[in-house]
Amino acid sequence: MSDQQQRVTFGTIKRLDESTRDCIAFGIWLAVFVALVAMTARGQSPLLTAGFLLQLTGAYSTFLLCGKSKYGPLVHAVPYICALAGAALLWSAPDFRNAVEASAMFLALIAIMHAAVIFGIGKDPLIAATAEI
């Protein structure tokens, strides 16, 4: 496979239907959910599993909820509520060190994603067509 074939652009992703992108995001979330449940069955703390799932839900809800204009302004709090609830569970998990650092990184990531959604970063067609992942 050549280098040119391996490139995926934002333009390609933007051309997907919104429902297709939502299904892909849900599929990724579901795969992580199954992996975390399997790890819990092998001895990982349920608090750790629930904390990671809530923080991941917060990250995905940034695009799935905040990116749609049909929802009201209160929906913009959902990613942060999920991330903070996940942070509380991570801090309570007995088998997870560095909960503060991990939670801070998730909150920073969610804030960057949320700013990208609110300010429409990447909506310029010239930038979207040339930017590469």
Image: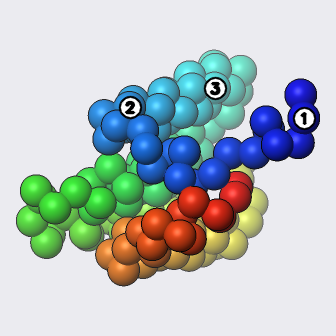
Answer whether labels 1 and 3 touch (C-beta < 8 Å): no
Task: Kindly identify which residue carries mark 2.
Answer: 20
Please tell me whether mark 2 sits on a helix, a strand or a loop: helix
For the residue pair 106 and 26, the one nearer the viewer reads as 26
Q: Which corner quadrant of the image does residue 58 belong to? A: bottom left
Q: Secondary structure at mark 1?
A: loop
Vertical position of residue 98 compared to residue 33: above or below: below
Quadrant where the image shows the N terminus: top right
Which tag, 2 or 1, sits closer to the chain's start? Answer: 1
Residue holding disc 3: 35
- In 3D space, how far apart are the residues under numbered discs 2 and 1 (Cα atoms)? 26 Å
User: Which of marks 2 and 3 precedes in the sequence?
Assistant: 2
Amino acid type, mark 3: Ala
Q: Residue at 88% across / 42% down in the picture?
A: 3
**How many angstroms separate mark 1 from mark 3 (CA)?**
32 Å
Instruction: Give, as a three-letter code, the residue at label 2.
Output: Thr
The reply to whether the C-beta atoms of the residues labelled 3 and 2 are less than 8 Å apart is no
